[in-house]
Image (cartoon, grey):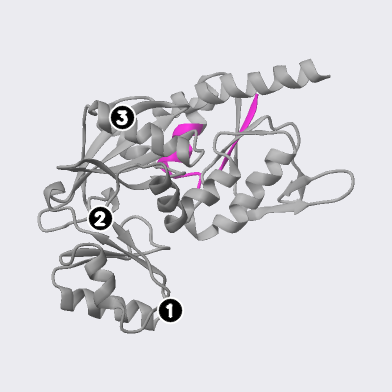
Amino acid sequence: MRIAVLSRNPNLYSTRRLKEAIEDAGHEALIIDHSLCDLVIEQEGPSIFYKGEKLKDIQAIIPRIGASVTFYGTAVVRQFELMGAFSAVESQAIVRSRDKLRSLQILSREGLGMPKTAFTNFSKGGEKQLIDQVGGAPLIIKLLEGTQGLGVVLAETKKAGQSVIEAFHGLKARIIVQEFIKEAKGADIRAFVVNGKVVGAMKRQGEEGEFRSNLHRGGQATVIKLSSAERKAALAAAKALGLAVAGVDMLQSTRGPLILEVNSSPGLEGIEKATGINIAGKIVEYIEASANKKTSKRQIKQ
């Protein structure tokens, strides 16, 4: 098979590992910068030109779409899908998961545990009410567009919370307000899901005095064995958002696992180094099985 990794940086750990895994499995690997793709839509059908050349005979793709280029990146993924390529992560699922508010609404509908969350439409003077709705201070305030722990603020008091919310609203920045889970102690869990199975899990612990556990913020990762409840929550969250490949971030709390976020382009470096598991290889195995099924179905129809 010809399998393309959609990535803007061929030197990233995740991109390099996926390329290695594709080649180790005996396939041809291409790295395509989706931001440089031109999409052509006409009566003869959809096509993609990359650096002036028409892309042909790509059987599968692995999208690594950054948050800053979600709109164009998912358009490229969708074009590949329309051309018959199998995508490890469906375009619509990427869109669904990237919208933090929408994804939390979907998880809530499915009855999954999560920190209590509130959202408002820049209502002037409603800051105190918003804080009360998530149980008061301390509380977490998050930019809807934030990634890797950026745009996440811990407000220790109601007054501080009101000031931060007012500041964000004054800038017309969309935010969500969440309850603070004290017992998590600056740590969270990432469960890596591939094709309906948890293939690896790690616990990320923030630096002393840091409430964010992101590895980009200096957090440390260690392997962890998930409880039955944590495993079920991770699988249910990925399924609810339609993600066959996902990183599900959860907090451990006195009322069970609480889902923070479901990532459609989870990094491989932290999870592979913490667990020693060939996660990239698991993704390629999933593509092999799924793309072959898709080809078989097409042949039966013909």
- Residue range of the region highlighted in magenta in the rendering: 1-18
Q: Which residue is mark 2?
A: 217
Where disc 1 sits, the SS reads loop
Q: CA distance from mark 3 to mark 2?
A: 26 Å
The verdict on residue 243 being magenta is no
Comparing marks 3 and 2, which lies closer to the viewer?
3
**Three-letter residue code for mark 3:** Arg
Residue at position x 43%, y 52% in the image: 105
Dot 1 alpha-carbon crowd within 10 angstroms: few under 14, some 14 to 19, many 20 or more: few
Q: Residue at x 32, y 43 (%)?
A: 249
Q: Is residue 4 magenta?
A: yes
- 136 shown above or below 274: below
User: First in sequence: mark 3 or mark 1?
Assistant: 1
The kind of secondary structure element at disc 2 is: helix
Q: Secondary structure at mark 3?
A: helix
Q: Label 3, on which residue?
A: 231
Distance from Cα at disc 2 to Cα at disc 1? 26 Å
Which amino acid lies under the numbered mark 1 shown in the image of this protein? Lys
Given residues 57 and 154, the one toward you in this image is 154
Query: Real-space Cα distance between discs 3 and 1?
Result: 38 Å
- Whether residue 7 is visible to the viewer of this picture, yes or no, is no
Q: Are marks 2 and 1 in contact (CB under 8 Å)?
A: no
